[in-house]
Amino acid sequence: MSSNSVFERRSNGGLAATAKDYQDPPPAPFIDAGEFTQWSFYRAITVEFVATLLFLYILVLTVIGYDTQSATNVCGGVGVLGIAWAVGGMIFVLVYCTAGISGGHINPAVTFGLFLARKISLIRAVFYIMAQCLGAICGCALAKSFQKGYYVRYRGGTNILADGYSITTGLAAEIAGTFILVYTVFSATDPKRNARDSHVPVLAPLPIGFAVFIVHLATIPITGTGINPARSFGAAVIYNRTEAWDHHWIFWVGPFVGAAIAAIYHQVIIRAGAVKALGSFKTSSAL
C-alpha cells in the first residue's frame, strides 16, 4: 500500500485505502498572459514590493545601529548575532504575512528557483523580481532618509567582499548560502508534505527564517551576506560608491546559481522527478 494513500473507515471499523493517491499539482504555464487580467496578480506584486521594502528598512537600520554603537564601544550594539536574529526574524514575519498572497518570496533567488521548478510562470517571476528590486531600493532610501550621516559613514549595509577573502570564496559563500535558503523553501512548502501533515503550511515561515538566520551567522564575515540579489542591489544603488559595485556581480551570480542547484536537487533527487518521468515513459511505451 502506498504511503500516500488516503484512508477511509469502513462500516465495520476497518481501514480501506481509496484510489485517492497524492497527485502533484500541474506545473505552472511557462508564459501565462491571463495573469494580466487578474487582480490577484497585481496584489501579489504589490505585496512583494512592500515586503522587500520593509525587509531592507529593518536590515539597513540594524546594521547601521550596530556599526554606530560598536564604533565607540567594542562590546556595544547587537553584534553579528543580533543582526542575524533581526534579519531571520524579519523574514519569518514577512513570509508569514505574505505567503497566502504572493507566496512570500521577497528574494529574486527564491523566485528564480521556483520558476525553474515550474511553480510560477515566467511573467510572474519577472514582475516579482522587478517589484523586489524596486522595493529594496525604496527601503534603503527610507533608511537613509532617517540617518543620512550614519548611512554614508557605515556604507548603508552594502554587501562588500571582506578583506582577506578571494572572489572565489565570496562566490562560493553566496552559492552555498542561497542553496540552503532555497532548499529550505522547497522543503517547507512541498505540497506533498502539506497534504500529509496539516501543520506544515503554518510552520513553513519558521524554518525559512531560521535558514536565513543561520546563513547570516556563517557568511556576514565574508560578504556581509547577500543571498538575495534585491537586497544587494538596493543597498548598492542608494550607497552608490565604487566599492559597492566592485564585486557586485557575485551577489547576482552566486544566489542564482545556488537557487538553480537547490531547485534541481529538490525536484530531481528529493522528489524523484527524473525517475517519475522515466517510469511514465516506460509505461506509455509498454502500452
Image (tube, grey):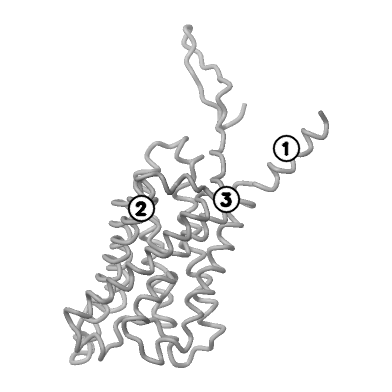
What residue sits right under mark 2 in the picture? 205
Question: Camera-side residue: 46 or 272?
Answer: 46
Per the image, label 2 sits on a secondary structure element best described as helix
Whole-percent x, y for residue 282 in the image: 79, 37
State the mark number for residue 11. none
Residue density around tag 2, few if under 14, some if 14–19, many if 20 or more, within 10 Å: many
Q: Earlier in the sequence, mark 3 or mark 1?
A: 3
Percent position (x, y) of residue 89?
A: 29, 62
Q: Which one is nearer the viewer's eye here, 7 or 150? A: 150
The amino acid type, in three-letter code, at marker 2 is Pro
Image quadrant occupied by the C terminus: top right
Q: Kindly identify which residue carries mark 3.
A: 30
Measure the alpha-carbon separation of dots 2 and 1. 34 Å
Q: Give whichever of 282, 213 is nearer the camera.
A: 282
Relative to residue 254, is residue 3 depicted above or below? above
The residue depicted at 53 percent of the width and 88 percent of the height is 166
Q: Please state the horizontal and vertical placement of residue 150, each as a whole percent of the image.
A: 21, 87
Q: Which numbered disc, 2 or 1, marks the residue that appears first in the sequence?
A: 2
Mark on residue 280?
A: 1
Report the residue that reaches farthest toward the right: 286
Is the residue 101 above or below the residue 64 in the image? above
